[in-house]
Amino acid sequence: MNQFMQLAIEEARNGIRAGDGGPFGCVIVRDGEVIGRGHNEVIRQHDPTCHGEMMAIRDACRNLGTHDLSGCELYTTAEPCPMCLGAIRWANLRKVYFGCNIADTDRIGFRDQIFYENRWEASEELDRAACLEVFAEYQALRHEQY
């Protein structure tokens, strides 16, 4: 078994045994060293964004003092959901290794599959012109692009 996946599994076990959330653990590795770790804390934090991958990304970014995890690899017990996949892409992670797939996650009662199948119809554009003004203000300021 891969040593980093074993650490992700240990994170997941720690989380489920503590009652923090689902069986989702994650570690982030750079140059063979673990720089971030996390497990699902949705129940503990009362926050639906506290997936294992999100917690590990937050931990790695804090530990490195950056929002850019280029060159890093992520090991997780389950295939990332769309939210986590978005965060992984925004963080510039190089590679993702996952254990269980979406069908496995569905079999234990999680509803990831619906997010891949259906576009959510409960969204609509509103006050675009006013929001574009904020975008223009942001563009006019000196800022770090990420």
Image (cartoon, helix red, strand yellow):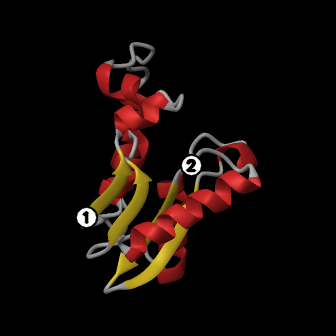
Per the image, the residue denoted by label 1 is: 95
Q: Is residue 49 above or below residue 67?
A: above
**What's the residue type where badge 1 is placed?**
Lys
Q: Is residue 109 visible?
A: yes
For this rendering, which residue is in front, 97 or 73? 97
Q: Residue furthest top?
A: 121
**What's the residue type where badge 2 is placed?**
Pro
48 sits left or right of 5 in the view: right
Give the residue displayed 66% in from the left and 46% down from the top: 21
* Mark closer to the chain start, 2 or 1: 2
- Element type where label 1 sits in the image: strand
Per the image, the residue denoted by label 2 is: 23
Give the residue displayed 36% in from the left and 45% down from the top: 135
**Residue 84, horizontal then vertical, whole percent:** 42, 48
Q: Residues within 10 Å of mark 1 (few under 14, many from 20)?
A: some
Give residue 113's quadrant in the image.
Answer: top left
- Element type where label 2 sits in the image: loop
Q: Quadrant of the N terminus?
A: bottom left
71 sits left or right of 62 in the view: left
Residue 122 - label: none
For this rendering, which residue is in front, 95 or 126? 95
